[in-house]
Image: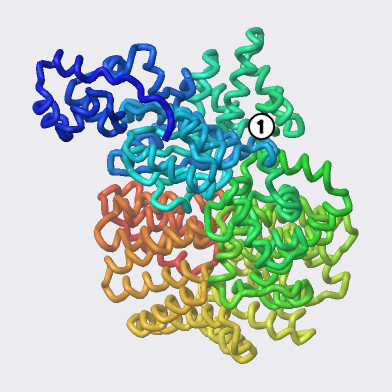
Amino acid sequence: MSGATPEVNLRAFRLRAMLTQEELALKAGVGVRTIRDIESGRVRPQPRTLRLLCKALNLDERGRALLIGSAGNAGTVPRELPRALPGFAGREEHLGSVLTAVDEGAAVVAVHGMAGVGKTALAVRIAHELAPRYPDGQLFVDLRGYTDPAGSRPDLVSVLTRALGSLNVDERDVPADPSELAAYYRSTIADRSVLLVFDNASDAEQVEALLPGTASSLVLTTSRRDLSRLAGAFSVPLEPPPMPEAVAMLGAAAGRITADGAVSVAERCGRLPLALGLAAARLRSRPQWRVEDLLARLDHEDRLLDELDMGHRGVAAALRTSYLELDAAHRRLLRRLSLVPGDDVDAHAAAALCAVDEERASAMLESLVEVHLVETRAPGRYRMHDLVRLFATRLAELEETEDDRNAALARMLEVYLHFAYQAASHITSPFQEHFTEEAAAHDAGLPGFVDHEGAVAWFEAERGNLAAAVRAASAGPAWHLATAFSAFRMHDRDSELHLAINQTALNLARDLGDERKEARSLGDRGRQLAFAGRRDEAIDCLERSAVVTRRLGDTGAATWALRNVGLMHRQSGRFTDALGVYHEALILAEAISDATAIVHINLNMVVPLLHLGRLAEAEQCIVEAERLMDVDDVYNRSRIENFRGVFVREHGDPAAALVLHSACLERCRQRGIREGLTPVLVELGEDLLHLGRGAEAVAHLQQAVEYAEELAYPALERMARNSLGRALTATGDPDAALGHHQRAASLAESHEDAYELARAHHGLAVAHRDLGASSAAERHLRHAARGFEDCGTPEAALVAKELDRITQR
């Protein structure tokens, strides 16, 4: 090996420390002969030996430089770290986790994330924190993985040569052969304690070739590609910071910004640190601007990327370098993901966008995740950062024809329609047969669902996309998507969203001039309004639906509309009116021998008949429904089982009723009949009260209230709360009962339900009586008596007797 041996002034420092050669050797842990050879100039100390001698002689960096020659040689210890951002804020959790990992022995730290997420800033911040631990220097090498065209990026030889030069290795000593060079690099660094920062790596393989062979040094690397595959590396996946950190970053960078203003700016920037820094720079360079002026410029999606542009340092420029790394197929997928109307996508939809099979689409999506152009927050679901989506949208407009974009979107919407109707056909409802027919008509040759649970899980995952697809689709597909969406009302408590989707369907049907679709949408809207407790509007929609379907000769649809009008009357306590409408619907259904409609109408007549005290007629309705019911009709089978339990209890056998209702509850849970859970739990509570098992009754009725609240179904909630209040009073807790009866009364008043309002007053009367508030009890009893009388129910006579007893006292 050539090259002059630098002068090492060891003897002078040893004598100054008043140590013999033997004493220094012992203190440093090296051989006496080594000390003699160094002092005589026969050998040059290895880095490890030099470090041990400095420690034994208690030398600082300047003393070390003097030891090996003169103060002018202090530059032999490289200090290459860039300046840390003076306004660096946030990322404390990441910083802490890295420091802990290094304390625990990590020799490689890999920070990876999307363009502009702040990887380099974090790495430099970490490096400055760790620098004192690595006395042999800190190297910083930009690997330019996503900066320059691929052809101009440094190869392994140039990077290793550059690193060795920073470590003061004479270039004449550096081997030319790549494999020998790599071995020499590892040998040179083996006994040193160096912090190596490799920024902007193209992939894990590039970093792997630069790793030292020993753990005495630390490698800190960054990349836009996932570096988790680096063996033994402590992986730091970096995402846009949470809002509090984003606000802190803006405050540190911009200075003159309020917390509220910072939140608004951060939202528009997608909390991406690069965008935040550019927005702050705009504010700093425009002292006359207010934050509102900046927000106004950031408020338009089509101009947002332009506002965050500073030439090669802008957001679009940073994303473009990642985009250009992709092959043609992956570029096309990224562009077309911008067409997704919702927030995320699965492989089926992505496959339709690019006209490839699902397996290929899944692999391509994972590849985009690898380079942090696409995110995945749940297995099989993929989304883009807001700024990436804007970037992809711009690319799609520039590089795709309008016809290609429209065709891709149409294919994706066909996929949504396929799965929407397939899922709807598994949701237990009176309209299951209709959804099954539509599923067959819109079959795209893709998989379906094997059970109710799978269908509901699909809806919950795709709910936002379906709602957005309704707005994005052309009129015909949008109407079908909106109609399928309505099947999931019992699995989604957002009644306002369902009403909005339904209104869209109704408008589309009118735009299409399709009266059949309009009538169907009016019927759906009536049902949605019924769930929301808007009775008069619901009845109006349902009656209009019945008129249109009759005129079109669709008697079956007219019977369904009338059935729901009857339901509205029933839920208002107008039981006689309900029976009148049900009889009208039954005549229509019998005229066309519609067995399914006849079954539903007979079962709907049971509740008003029971409330009116006409038990025998109610039982006859059950017999007629069961005679015509399809053997696979699990929805109506559960209703019959529930009613049979009521009949058994009414005939004086609550224990047998409890057995029937318990079995019915289990079947409802197994079959996913959510609408049936509250009614069955209410009846179970009644059975248990009759058996004197009040605590169990309360527990079941509390569940009934919870299910009703989950469904956002006020009619069920007020019924369940009244029953729960009654059970609480019976078990000695009238104070708790008051709250439930008052809530039930409030719901009943707002939804004009005379019967449940009367029940609430009766429950309040009994609770007040047990609390010793006789005047309040009497007042509520009078309200209850009038309410039950208006409804025509037998409770009117019973309450009148209670009132007589109180007044006679």
Horizontal and vertical percent for residue 574? 60, 64
> In this orientation, which residue lies closer to the viewer: 108 or 627?
108
- Looking at the rendering, which quadrant does residue 29 occupy? top left
Horizontal and vertical percent for residue 407? 84, 57
- Looking at the rendering, which quadrant does residue 13 occupy? top left
> In this orientation, which residue lies closer to the viewer: 411 or 740?
411
Q: Is residue 269 above or below residue 615?
A: above
Q: Is residue 592 above or below residue 276?
A: below
Residue displayed at 54% across by 66% down: 792
Q: Is residue 733 left or right of residue 23?
A: right
> What crowding class fits label 1: few (fewer than 14 Cα within 10 Å), some (14-19), or many (20 or more)?
many
Label 1: element kind:
helix
Q: Residue furthest bottom?
A: 627
Quadrant of the snapshot with the C terminus: bottom left
Q: Is residue 26 above or below residue 676?
A: above
- Looking at the rendering, which quadrant does residue 316 occupy? top right
* Numbered circles on residues, count: 1
> In this orientation, which residue lies closer to the viewer: 321 or 393?
321
Q: Residue furthest top?
A: 288
Residue displayed at 87% across by 63% down: 515
Is residue 650 among what the camera can see? Answer: no
Q: Is residue 28 left or right of residue 367?
A: left
Horizontal and vertical percent for residue 58? 19, 20
Quadrant of the snapshot with the N terminus: top left
Horizontal and vertical percent for residue 205? 53, 50
> In this orientation, which residue lies closer to the viewer: 117 or 246?
117
Residue type, mark 1 in image: Val
Q: Is residue 485 left or right of residue 262?
A: right
What residue is pinned by disc 1? 315
